[in-house]
Image (spheres, rainbow, N blue to C red):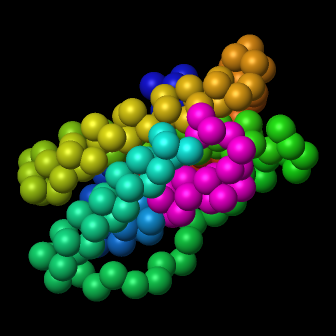
């Protein structure tokens, strides 16, 4: 999957299982954040025609996921609210270069890596929860279908506006950077930590 360099181990799943409520609240925030990030591309790069419709569709999908998570939280009597954000996204995006067009490329690729990591961990959750919480396992499986498409979409969009070799080379660097962040972090009961 996108050549993630750090493989999340089974100890992560074991660590998160007792924290399902916090994990679901985080999931809601992540979906909302993903929608907001896609919309911010539309505002920042209105002249990049190839980004517009795919990212508008992606934003809609992420907002639908947000609504689905909110509904599940309500069913489970879990109150949605603020949550102290993890440091993963901030640390990952610290690699984004400030000048265009590098900035756009790095941003698209960071989003690709975030989607790929979500996808990897949601798949682990779908498997790990199958026995203990089949309803939740099914829920993560349902979200997975879209997330599996999203990471490829960001790479594809990047290749539409930047030379494909440059995209591949930069993706390697960002994947190595992301692996460094996760291996230094140790397992935390969050999808992104
Ligand atoms: Fe999503
Ligand atoms: Fe996504």
Q: Is residue 34 magenta?
A: yes
Percent position (x, y) of residue 121? 38, 44
Picture mark count: 0
Say above or below: 161 vs 113.
above
Give 183 or 75, whichever is nearer the viewer: 75
- On the rendered image, what quadrant is the N terminus found in? top left
Percent position (x, y) of residue 79? 28, 85
Q: Residue at x 30, y 59 (%)?
A: 64
Q: Most extreme residue toward the right, as rendered?
A: 99
Query: Magenta residues?
Result: 33-51
Please, what is the dominant secondary structure of the magenta stretch?
helix
Q: Residue at x 83, y 38 (%)?
A: 102
Percent position (x, y) of residue 171? 68, 28
- On the rendered image, what quadrant is the C terminus found in? bottom right
Q: Residue at x 49, y 56 (%)?
A: 34
Q: In screen coordinates, is 113 left or right of 174?
A: left
**Can residue 1 be spotted in the picture?**
yes
Percent position (x, y) of residue 82? 46, 83
Q: Is residue 2 magenta?
A: no
**Can residue 188 be spotted in the picture?**
no
Q: In screen coordinates, is 1 left or right of 44?
A: left
Give 10 or 193, whichever is nearer the viewer: 193
Q: Quadrant of residue 71?
A: bottom left
């Amino acid at each position: 999957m996108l050549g993630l360099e750090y493989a999340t181990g089974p100890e992560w799943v074991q660590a998160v299982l007792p924290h399902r409520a916090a994990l679901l609240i985080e999931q809601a925030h992540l979906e909302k954040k993903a929608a907001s990030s896609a919309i911010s591309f539309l505002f920042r790069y209105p002249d990049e025609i190839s980004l517009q419709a795919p990212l508008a569709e992606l934003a809609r999908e992420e907002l639908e996921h947000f609504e689905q998570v909110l509904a599940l939280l309500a069913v489970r009597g879990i109150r949605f609210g603020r949550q102290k954000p993890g440091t993963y996204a901030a640390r990952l995006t610290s690699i984004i270069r400030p000048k265009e067009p590098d900035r756009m490329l790095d941003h698209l690729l960071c989003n690709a890596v975030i989607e790929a990591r979500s996808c990897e961990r949601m798949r682990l959750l779908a498997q790990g929860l199958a026995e203990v919480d089949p309803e939740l396992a099914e829920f993560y499986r349902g979200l997975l279908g879209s997330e599996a498409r999203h990471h490829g979409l960001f790479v594809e969009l990047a290749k539409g506006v930047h030379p494909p070799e440059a995209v591949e080379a930069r993706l390697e660097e960002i994947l190595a950077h992301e692996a460094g962040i996760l291996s230094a972090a140790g397992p935390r009961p969050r999808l992104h930590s």
